[in-house]
Each structure stands twice: as C-alpha cells, then as structure tokens.
Amino acid sequence: MQRIVFILCVPLSACVSDAAPPACVAMCEAAAALYGDCLTDWGADWSAAGYADEEDFLGACETWGWEMSLLEADAVDRGTEAARGSVARTCRSRRAAFADPDASCDAYTGTDWNARPWDDTAEDDTGGT
C-alpha cells in the first residue's frame, strides 16, 4: 500500500509531517499486540475498549504520537528545550515495556496517555526526581 505524506507548516515551527514519528508507530504496534491480548484474556474485543478494531486502535495511537510531536515542536519553539526528542524517547521506552515478553496488562493500562512526555524530562532537568 502506498502512503502519501502531507507536510504541515505551523507558525513559529518547522514543517512537520502528518505521520507519527517512527518510534511511536513501533510503540503503537507493540501496544496493539499487548492490549489485544489483554482484551482477549478479559473476554472482550476492541469495541469494548472503544475501537472498531485493531486498525482503529492503531490509528488513534499513531494520532497520539503525531499530536504529541506537534506539541513538542511548539514547546521547543516556546523555549522548553527539555521537550526536544521527548516524544521519541517516550515511545521507545513504552515500546520496550509493551513488547517485553513478561509484560502484564498493567504495562498498558497503567500508562498515562494524557501526560506530556517532556513534563517528566523538564522536572528531571531542573533538579527534580
């Protein structure tokens, strides 16, 4: 399947692709595998989780990665240097956790999808824990 990628230019930031960063695409695939297995174990399907199917989940997950990458670029433009690269780092870390053969469903369900990836990084850079 051929994919067309559009480029968006937002004020005060560089042009950004409309696709999720590759690290986030890989994370989403690992998340889908883990969460799909959890749903099966729980006797549920994707619709019980609010998705039409696994493909719908992947689309929503990749949209999260794309949106976070846009917000990251905006944060960097506003001077939050700790944001730079945080989305890719977060996606790589989550992918590792989701793809771990010993991962439990808590690895997915315990993920805070509302947190901005750079918030923890910014805290660490300012002397937080």
Image (tube, grey):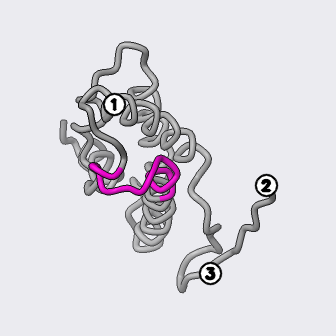
Q: Judge from the rendering whether residue 4 lies leftward or rightward of residue 125; answer left or right.
A: right
Nearer to me, 63 or 44? 44
Q: From the viewer's perspective, is the residue at label 1 or at label 2 nearer?
A: 1
Q: Please tell me how crowded label 3 is: few (under 14), some (14-19), or many (20+) other residues with Cα within 10 Å.
A: few
- The reply to whether the magenta stretch includes residue 57 is yes
SS at mark 2 in the image: loop
Distance between the Cα atoms at labels 3 and 1?
41 Å
Residue plotted at (29% across, 26% down): 41
Q: Which residue lies at the image location 61% right of the left edge and 62% below the top edge?
A: 19
Q: Residue at x 34, y 20 (%)?
A: 103
Residue 9, numbered label: 3
Q: Residue lying farthest top?
A: 102
Residue 9 rendering spot, x and y as whole percentages: 62, 81
Q: Quadrant of residue 128?
A: top left
Q: Residue 97, how many percent across, how many down?
A: 39, 27
- C-alpha distance separating marks 1 and 2: 29 Å
Disc nearer the start of the sequence (3/1): 3
Query: In the rendered view of the protein, which quadrant contains the N terminus?
Result: bottom right
Please state the horizontal and vertical placement of residue 69, each as a whole percent of the image. Answer: 49, 61
Q: Nearer the viewer, mark 3 or mark 2?
A: 2
Q: Which residues are magenta?
A: 47-59
The kind of residue tagged 3 is Cys
Tell me if residue 126 is in the magenta stretch.
no
Q: Main secondary structure of the magenta part?
A: helix
Q: Which mark is residue 107?
A: none
Q: Secondary structure under badge 3?
A: strand
Of badges 3 and 1, nearer the viewer stands 1
Query: Tag on residue 40?
Result: 1
x then y, percent, for residue 99 = 46, 25
- The residue indicated by pointer 2 is 1
SS at badge 1:
helix
Q: Residue at x 21, y 42 (%)?
A: 127
